[in-house]
Image: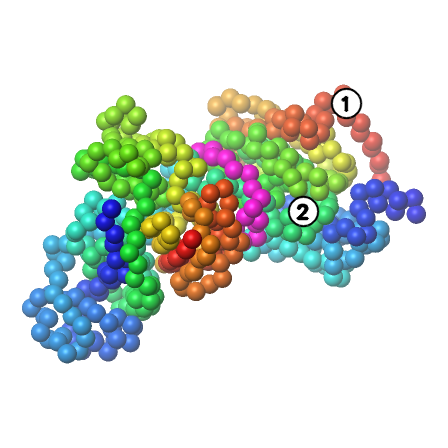
Amino acid sequence: MRQQKKRRRFIAPQDVVGIKVNCSGAPQIFSAPEVAGAIAEKLVAVGVPAANIWLYERFESQVRTVPYAEFLPAGAQIWTAETTRGSILGYDPKVYVETSFFGEDDTRSNLARLITDKLTKIINVPNTKEHQASGVTGCLKNIAYGNFSNVARSHQYEVTNTKTFIGTLAATEPVRSRVVLNVMDGLRGVWHQGPFSNEARFRFYPKILMLGTDPVAMDRQLIELIEAKRKAEGAVSIFERARTTLGNNRDPNKNAFIREPGHVEYAGKLGLGVYDLDRIRVKEIEL
Amino acid sequence: MMLLLTAALLPRLFWDAGPETAPQLQQAGVEKIAVAADRVASWKGLMEVDAADPAHAIRLVAPSVDYRANQATASRAPWINANGWRFLRAPAGEFVYDVKGAQAALAAAEAFSWNANALIRTDAAGLGPLGEMLRLLRGVPAEDLAPVADFGFEDDGSTAAGEVMNLFVKGNLLFRIVPRPEPSLKIHVKLGTKDYPLEDAKNPVKIAQMARANLSDDRRSVRIYGSAVVVARLMAVPDRARLHLLNYAGAERRVDGIRIRVAGEYSKATVLPEMKILDFEKVDGGTEFTLPEIRTYAVVDLVK
């Protein structure tokens, strides 16, 4: 009963809830269907009808490689914004962030229609991954690049615009206020070549689940996690900006981009959360 | 300003085979052809025919998209092979396409959009797509509309100027060729001036971007969202407009969803081929709407 009360701080029975998974590295790495399924079960337990639970992601081609349906309660929905890659039909034409990075003609990044049309709450379920362009891909990037169209344009060249774009998107309403809980799936992770995981040698197993309401604080923890793993593997820091590190990323000391892990601190300055480690309270539960 | 009868010019199939192929052409939907002068007589009575000489026509590139994903490039935008600038440089010219298969349909739509006098030479596989496109184009109502231009460009006839115009067309930057600055246009672009130095014209992309920046996106008459391979041609008079939309990847793949913004507030839109227009709205002095798909070509008529 007490547990249910706690959960209802975030979700009410009348809510329509999105579970935003991350499948950008599927089928090698993705938000575990067991984790997504457990979240959905708890939603049902607090009174949300299964039909009002929407597991979603941008690309159908990635989601269909993961057996989410097997782990969701009967009646729960699976939705993708792009049933064919590049289609804009799954996005709301009236809600977008407009900017030009490299002279591209399509200057809009539109928010997924599911969010503007249906969802009242979102539970964000990212992975623990390094990202070649943004440094890490955790809560912020999953909720930003995972909900808007036309975002890859920010990292087409070695120097990217991920530092400011991720936070800008994550701070856009109604995304900002609808994400009420983050559950970072760190059962598996990627410490190099992310967000993909084409080479198993760059995969690792932190065996953690991180829960929180502050995406900046959680991504700060993710930075620490990835940095520690890379240090243990003898790889350069994700904060390294020397051009000498640009190159073929089969070598863990090389990368195609100058990484921008500073996007997490930048998001903190937009009011999305706390970046300062001294002000972050972490409560660990060992199972 | 001169008005154009936009449905006046349908591209013609230039056909090398003999009159025994007439049923094949008719079955494909081709009603009119052009042949070499010495063969006109042999086609008389079989179908509408006139004489043409492709050897004296301006050769066009096959309209298409080169993705070149495996090559290092200065831009990640797909490379569109388009001919709009050639039509603008020689508005009275006769043109010829050599295209295969489904490219014939795109060639016909491109020439039609630019009201160009064009011959299309194609193979047997191109007859069906060409005939289907010609059927669609014949159904586009005639209209007296003027091409919309946001800025003027002084074409000095050089290769550099040609490539700059090509980039303007592919980037949906609407312009017309002018001999001198025109006050009615928002900006004036001339290579070799302070704003557009010849040195910069060595990189035509830079010139195109400078013109876009000086014009500003807010003042552009048409914007395309959701595809990097669709080129628009806008014609208008004060109370109505026609927007031609060409999917340069149309021979291989359709565009699933495209958002369009046109300057000016229009109340109604109709589209060929027929489809439901989505999310139509007037916003900030413009009109925006979504087309659920573009296979090769679509034409949207807007009324205020």
- Return the residue at label 2: A21
In the image, what residue type sits under mark 1? Arg
Instruction: Check the image and report above or below for A220 versus B101.
Output: above
Total of numbered circles in the picture?
A: 2
Q: Residue at x 51, y 26 (%)?
A: A245
Confirm whether the magenta stretch covers residue B137.
Answer: no
Dot 2 crowding, Cα within 10 Å, few <14, some 14–19, many 20+: many
Q: Residue furthest right?
A: A1
In the image, what residue type sits under mark 2? Val
What x and y, as percent, mark residue A240? 56, 23
In the structure shown, which secondary structural element does the residue marked by tag 1 occupy? helix
Residue A287 appears left or right of A132? right
Q: Which residues are magenta?
A: A87-102
Confirm whether the magenta stretch covers residue A97.
Answer: yes
Q: Residue at x 25, y 54 (%)?
A: B4
What x and y, as percent, mark residue B77? 40, 42
What x and y, as percent, mark residue B25? 25, 73
In the structure shown, which secondary structural element does the residue marked by tag 2 occupy? loop
**Residue B219 falls in which quadrant of the image?**
top left
Residue A64 appears left or right of B188? right
Q: CA distance from mark 2 to mark 1?
A: 28 Å
- Return the residue at label 1: A279
Dot 1 crowding, Cα within 10 Å, few <14, some 14–19, many 20+: few
Q: Residue at x 53, y 23 (%)?
A: A241
